[in-house]
Amino acid sequence: MSADNIAAQAPNKPKNAIVILLDSLNRHMLGAYGGREFATPNLDGFARRAVRFDRHYSGSLPCIPARHDILCGAIDFLWKPWGSIEIWERPLTAYLRAAGVVTKLVSDHPHLFEVGGENYHTDFTAWDYQRGHESDPWQTRPDPSWMGAPSFARGHTAYDDSRGYFRGEADFPGPRTMAAATAWLERSARSHDRFMLFIDEFDPHEPFDTPEPYASMYDSSWQGPHMIWPPYVRGALAHGVLTVEQARQVRACYGAKLTMIDAWLGKLLGAIERGGFYDDTAVIVCTDHGHYLGEKDIWGKPAVPIYEPLGHTPLLIAMPGVGHGNVDTLTTNVDICATLADIFGVEMTHRTHGRSMLPLITGAARSIRDWALAGIWGREVHLIDADAKYARAPAGDNAPLSLWSNRWSTMPVHRMPQLQMPPPDERAVLDRMPGTRIPVIRQPFRAGDLLPFWAMGKFSGNYLYRVRDDPAEEANLAGSGEEKRAAEKLRAALIEMEAPKDQLERLALA
């Protein structure tokens, strides 16, 4: 069914919403999007009753910036890196609280509970944190029977201390998160007039660690500890970081994690069905971004442009009164926030960039945006439109570049504590963000300054792809006459966003 067919149906505006965010969910690996490598029967089954969005893209990356897009509705990678909700904005949950909507967070995402992500959960009515995933400092000593797995120079991690305490499948953080969300639906949801359940599930993010039968499901010939930690590198095979066998194993371990969390998602979807929630509740399945698993010999999330496997993401929405269909027009993560605000009838008063997708779902509109921006602060800036995807890198040094924030934090790198956000110095000034009169610290950086982790790495030039005709992004059109037109579109978009002038200057678009 196309968007045209959706219009023939009679949608009911939902009372409630359930958001299921699966971290690092690769669109091209889901059966609903044509993937055949790994089993995702429950995601595929949900897609058969949902509206499938075919041109949905991440905006701000990676994890916490993407959650800022979804919970605050404002793209912030042009202004700041990974960081907290600022004092000039409020998350959607604060507006819902004021409107009398009960909000529940169930999550095993460790970055929501550390510096740089510490206030995204605070405006939920209630929240439930399932401990022990990735960098979560849950235990102080490991189970001595756990032998560990190759870490690719990660050194000792918090997960090494936590892992031995998972005695069976149900003890892993992902299954516990899905079980806790299911229990809340069954025991508490109908006690409230209106609710939003937000499940922030860190799987299938690394570590790609699963018990049997999943661990050997896609690479039964592997001997020894499973390779649960992917390297973050471009050219892992070319440079000998991985052998062919190791590369197959890392990818298989991701598939194992994907299939395991799909199985536990099935239990949640069963509770949604049994409870009659599809009759009055919007159910949204989304992600923050994908994860490279060897496409272009890229692994993890290294310092490269945002190619399709990372930035082109799945989005499935089941809406009361609307059957299966597909929407083949551009959407991005801030539009999820705008859609939720529309469902609950709240108006967010701080500056936002999202547009409700309800008109697309009901067939009242064919499109809601002509372009979307995507990127990581301090890296390439990407423009996606109906014709192409354009990645523009700095023309010379990665400068000038400013950080705008009143909450001075970024993602902690526990094995490299020196990679902290440097404090503002004598160059800092008070400025104004678009849409606010609150004074904001603007810290300029110049070439040679230590930048946050995600802004590090060399650049390799500009990239322009016609992704509809070239989904593998093999024919780079940068340097052609088409790039000039794409650059002008990007410049116009940045001006419309009121992006910092130093962004235009560093990209040679001023």
Image (cartoon, grey):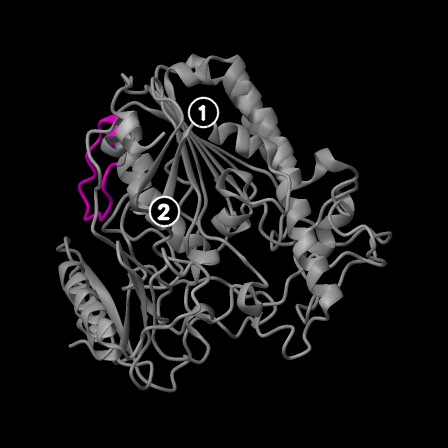
- Circle 1 is placed at which residue position? 49
120, 359: nearer the viewer: 359
Is residue 394 within the magenta segment? no
Is residue 351 within the magenta segment? yes
- Circle 2 is placed at which residue position? 56
Depicted 20 relative to depicted 148: above or below: above
Under mark 2, the amino acid is His
Contact, CB < 8 Å: mark 2 with mark 1? no
| The quarter of the displayed image where residue 262 is located | top right
Residue 495, position as x, y percentages in the image:
14, 64
Label 2, label 1: how far apart the Cα atoms are = 18 Å
Residue 396, position as x, y percentages in the image:
31, 86
The residue at the point 25 percent across, 48 percent down is 89
Under mark 1, the amino acid is Arg
Q: Identify the secondary structure beneath mark 2.
A: strand
Depicted 312 relative to depicted 34: above or below: below
Residue 324, position as x, y percentages in the image:
40, 26
Range covered by the magenta-colored residues: 342-356
Classified by dominant secondary structure, the portion drawn in magenta counts as loop
Q: Is residue 503 visible?
A: no
Residue 427, position as x, y percentages in the image:
25, 80
- The residue at the far front in this view is 469
Q: Which mark is residue 439?
A: none
The residue at the point 45 percent across, 52 percent down is 289
